[in-house]
Image (spheres, helix red, strand yellow):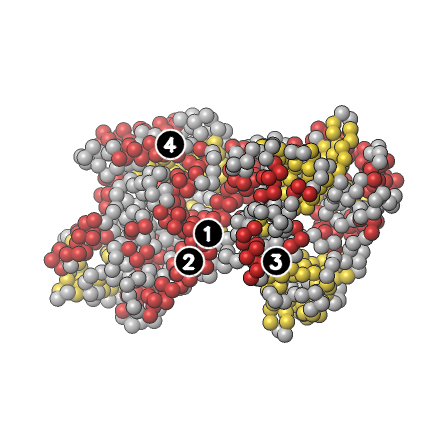
Amino acid sequence: MSELSNDTMLLETPFHSRIKELCGLNDWGNWSGYTTPNAYFDVELEYFALRSTTGVFDLSPMNKYRITGPDVEPYLNRLVTRDVSKIGINRVGYAIWCDDAGQLLDDGTLFRLSKNDYRLCAYRRATDWLQWCALGFDVNIVDETDEIAGLAVQGPTSCSTLTAMGLTDLEHLKPFGMKNYDFEGESLMVSRTGFTGDLGYEVWIAPEKAELLWDRLFAAGKQFLIKPIGSYALDIARIETGFLQAGVDFVSAEEVIRPGRSRSPFELGLAWLVDFNKPLFNGRKALLAERENGSRYRFALLDIDGNKPADHSFILKGGKQVGTVTSAVWCPTAKSNLAFAQFEMPHGAVGEKFVAEIYYQRELHWTRLLAPCTVIDRPVFNPARRRKTPAIAF
Amino acid sequence: MKKYDAIVIGAGHNGLTNASYLAKAGLSVAVLERNAYIGGATVSRELHEGWIYSNCSYVCSLLRPEITRDLELPRHGLQVVPYGGSTTFMRNGDYLGSYFDHDRQYREFARHSKRDANAYDRYSADVLKQTRLIRPFLLKTPPDPTSLKLRDLKDLADFAGSFLHMGEEGLADTIRFWTKSVGDYLNEYFETDVIKAHLAGSGIIGTALGVFSPGTAYVLLHHYMGEVDGTVGAWGFARGGMGAVSAALSKSLQTFGGDIICDANVDRIIVKNGKATGVALKNGDEYQAPIVVSNLDPKRTFLDIMEAEDLPAEVVKKATNFKIRGSSGKLNIALDGVPKFNGLDLNSPLMIGDMHFSDSLTRQERAYDDWKDETWSKDPYLDMTMPTMADPTMAPPGKHFMSVFVQYAPPKINGREWTDEDKAGFEKTVLDQIGNYSPNFKDLILHCETRTPREIEAEVGLTEGNIFQGELTFDQLLFNRPFPGYAQYRGPVKGMYMCGSGTHPGGGVMAAPGANAAREILSDLKKPNIIPEGYADD
């Protein structure tokens, strides 16, 4: 990855030379200061590569923090809301972290590399918060965002592809497990994780070997119909499977300027990640009080009539606004019209019916649509192959 | 003897704003200006042939957009072009650049410290929270906390409401901001000297305090609460120099039928039977008006152009004790070309922005130590800009105008007045400071105007050359500005008002004091309020 320097361009990831060749649409975006493809050749085909064959997404700009030291477990247990001690070695856990007011700062994945060695992947830059929280703990925190390149290899043929590349016995890796392979003298870390809700892996390598990894992967995956995918296709997949995105579905409490715009884990449907059995963690007291007194908001999945995506819609009940949509998409696999909504309490219970106020435009003609919608209890895309071990071949 | 409905003393931006609104409301108004030219500290002057100098104020951000629009200043020629960024040069040959583009900003800060680059987001959010608390009150008269008037009670309740709305943490932050030093405040966020020094500059500009003096965190906030086209905290150049602001205001005033009379040096406000009835000039001319508005600072107003016998003793005492200390000087330089700065590409957007040469809080505090020792800083903090990087109207093609704001310069040197030798020494110190970071700078100098507090006071009329018409410390803000009991623009004498930066919300080319004072005057005349409300800050 480019050295930090006075140069003023967006940075390029270690895979850029390969991505550039494949990015036929030349449609680029900015992810965390890196030039990343929005789309390579066709957003819909890229999406269907994820759902039917294998899609490869460059994860390198993801913020990565290596956290080590004798106090790492107590440190992480204070940082995040779940019980870190339950994450075994060579296992990965989804985790969220809050400020003292119990408001969500970010979510991410925690990789336990060995007893006292973790890697935290975070959507937002977190150095400052991680360092503040480290006061009084014997831990070492290193930002290794630039030192590790990553690819998400996701979809029904992802296991076959990686196996064909020489990663033996990968089919036995369980969801949220990880494994190390030798790749041309460098360690290649493979985790069965991802942001698509399907069978899939994330592979992590030193930047020097990134291009070679890309070449081997695409050579091995050719027969399994591997395709690179951009951020637009990934976004469809993540909504379809119910994954929140920081900055879209919630604003990090640290960035909130207007009072009341931050959210607690309870208000985002993340109560399952809060473990009150831990005696202390950031935000525990406030979250306990919230559990006692009730939340201000509720996160809900909405199944919306019709086929017009409810982007930025108001959600109405009896004509009164009771919620807003943060993410919405027509789900091409599940064939449903899905939205994530923030409801003011007490609205938004499963089964409750509302109206989504949708505006759409055809040839400069705007139409206001009042689409009935219902709160559903689970994401619409959740295939069995996502969990199956040994992983299926395709 | 000419008669008007209202006379405004001083054709600075606030005087012109005040007069424009009074004229717009139908009053016959005259603005009396001591100098041969208008603008006060908001001027463009050709002091070297072919060069236009913003020789006093030099950048624009605080000017209220509501007033700009309402008085049609763009139609009258005002254009504000935003900065490209800002830079602090370091002694080790490196520099710190601050860009508007978020990623670029992160990358550049991360070159110095990844943690600080990340912490900057939290810092920005915290500062923005505070500006949101203050900004709605800029175009309002400060409520009197001892009054039982409905309006005061309502405004106080609004203020208390938004204050409490911030929650415990936000409330604590507000107190910190109003009481802490900018150095202590920045130390809570950052670990890197140059980043802290870069941000601290805004906390001391125009203020006779050091980066570790309590109260300077608010001064930083004061510099963040302006905007350019809705970007809060952004700064810009007025095309044609800062005189473009006063020129546009004067045209606005003239379209409403107001008069501007230059070379009219006011000797005193005439008070009869406890009422202001007009003004007398030093040349003996008199103007009659039942309303007299002073745009001069509180000391000039109450101790110079008013007689003690016309005033309550309390007011004379408060004016005497009013803190308005000289702390800064200015160099205005005509350059034969673009100076090169260490490591900076001439095409960088940073070239269109402010530049500084103090890379640590320690150096900034030492610079203040010199002020306390009653001499100019030997390692001064500079706020330097070259508006001609973005403005083709201020110098011949290929040539440049450089504005150098200098901190610190005391009002007196070792207890005596500034001498020409002092001034020459001051000038050399500043030129050397810039020359240390720009090898060809000194060779490009064609002309240099140097202004110590002595010149600023003598030419502009600001006591001690204080650019804000009085320190922006909490004891002199809101309902305490300029002093308790007189914060609602009304003087102690019937018909006499104040509209300068010495009143709420304070200094900087903001025009809010002038507009707020006009609202109070119109209210006393039982005329409809025509002053625009502040834009909602959502």
Q: Give how far apart the Cα atoms at labels 2 and 4 are.
A: 34 Å
Q: In this rendering, which labeled residue sits more in front, label 4 or label 3?
A: 3
**How far from the left and from the top, in percent, is residue A43?**
76, 50
Q: Do labels 2 and 1 share a chain?
A: yes
What amino acid is at disc 3? Glu
* Chain containing the residue with disc 1: B
Of residues B498 and B352, the one drawn nearer to the viewer in this rendering: B498
Of residues B254 and B56, the one drawn nearer to the viewer in this rendering: B56
Q: Give how far apart the Cα atoms at labels 2 and 1 are.
A: 11 Å
Q: What element carries label 2?
A: helix
Judge the density around disc 4: few (<14), some (14-19), many (≥20) Cα neighbours within 10 Å.
Answer: some
**How far from the left and from the top, in percent, is residue B442?**
38, 27
Q: Quadrant of the N terminus of chain A?
A: top right
Mark toward the start of the polypeptide (2 vs 1):
2
Residue B362's tag is: 4
Residue B271's tag is: none
Residue at 29% across, 68% down: B148
Q: Name the residue under label 1.
A: B169
Instruction: Single out the residue that lies furthest toward the bottom.
Output: A318
Q: Pointers 2 and 1 in contact (CB under 8 A)?
A: no
What amino acid is at disc 4? Thr
Q: What element carries label 3?
A: helix
Q: Do labels 2 and 4 share a chain?
A: yes
Q: Mark 2 points at which residue?
A: B163
Mark toward the start of the polypeptide (2 vs 4):
2
Rendering quarter of residue B32: bottom left
* Chain containing the residue with disc 4: B
Q: In this rendering, which labeled residue sits more in front, label 2 or label 3?
A: 3
Residue A267's tag is: 3
Q: Are marks 1 and 4 on the same chain?
A: yes
